[in-house]
Image (cartoon, rainbow, N blue to C red):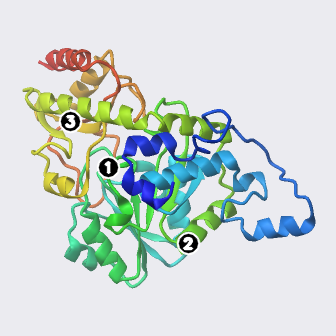
Amino acid sequence: MPDDHRRRHGFSTRMSHAGRAGVRIHGFVNPAVHRGSTVLFPDAASRMAAAAKRYDQHMTYGTQGGPTHYALEDVIAEIEGGSRCTIVGTGLAAVAVPLLAYLKAGDHCLMPDSVYGPARNLATGLMKGWGIETTFYDPCVDEAGMRALIRPNTKVVYTESPGSHTFEVQDIPAISRAAHAAGAKVMMDNTWGIHTFQPFAHGVDVSIQALTKYVGGHSDILLGSVTVNTEEDHVAVRSAASAMGHYASPDDCWLALRGVRTMAVRLKTQAAAALEIASWLEQQPQIQKVLHPALPSHPQHALFMRDFTGACSLFGIVLDARYSHEDMMRFVDGLSLFGIGASWGGYESLAIPTTGFITRSAGTGDFGGQTVRIHIGLEDVADLKADLAQGLHALG
């Protein structure tokens, strides 16, 4: 969608129209699914010309994508406020591709201590084995603190705001200023912020999304995206994805295109329900604190209000210090409307224990009690409150 449309139309309107052929073309409202491996050309010269433009949504072979992939790429770039997007098969692939595009043996990477667990595993496993060193830093670091962490060989400063499981809000503009002054790229997992945080307006170079979450919306696909705002970054990311053989199913891309049409209304409804439930949970005697950036009680609430235009439906709770790990497990097991499972952003509510399931190495993450991550779906708020109330009552 052209930039003037971004300025003129609201998010719901843009999500209804982005990545489509338009209302004045005769045909079905939704784009078709295009599947295939071999792409045929009328002559050898046409094949060579297409290969020269393979980073510019020109089909050369199935792994380079096709019309269904390109439509979804356009939609995600629209959401993120970027210029170019690469679709990959999972959210973790979207983490790995840009990291490995910009890092090589001897380089140094900075990651927040609150980072998504599989991203940490990538850094301490495969990347370490390839001679790439990673330092995990306090996610609440300020600009001066970030400058002190950056080394001459620091090539990437990775961010995730709010943090996975524990929802620390990072000062992305300050971190970006420090990183760019040292010539490092800033990457951000923006899945929580989806469209309420505009990464490129705050200094991010590479924005990562797990499209499995709100874009898919129905807990039935796996997809990821990497969005950038310069041609140089696009070529770096796209070529790395191609070199590593990353590919996304066109059927999953089509389902994501379908999901994104209703994302605005789903996200708005779920975010409002989550904030209502989070506020209610703060008043319960069994709860020590609620980890939701939109609540005034959150330590980085002011940063959230400065940089975000809204929240989503994922937050955490900390049980009172008198409750044990076994109590926490019993609380989660006692819920009837909340599924116990990974991921979030779908239509169903979820609850998973986080104490004992997360790793910290920079001295962060001690919240003084057992923690649980909550995702609010599309169920009636009154029913979810009643389910949580009976679970908390069982704790005594």
Classify 10 Å Cα crowding around label 1: few (below 14), some (14-19), many (20 and above).
some
Q: Position of residue 394 (x, y in %)?
A: 17, 15
Judging by the rendered image, the residue that carries numbered circle 2 is 231
Most foreground residue, 7 or 314: 7
Q: Position of residue 187 (x, y in %)?
A: 42, 64
| 215 on left or right of 357 | right
| CB atoms of marks 2 and 1 within 8 Å | no
At x 75%, y 71%, the residue is 52
Residue 289 is at least partly visible in this image: yes
Give whichever of discs 2 and 3 has the lower sequence position: 2
| 175 on left or right of 183 | left
Calculate the distance from the C-alpha at mark 3 to the C-alpha at mark 1: 22 Å
**Disc 3 vs disc 1: which is toward the camera?**
1
Residue 343 is at least partly visible in this image: no
Residue 44 vertical position relative to residue 360 in the rendered view, above or below: below
Q: Position of residue 90 (x, y in %)?
A: 55, 46
Judging by the rendered image, the residue that carries numbered circle 1 is 196
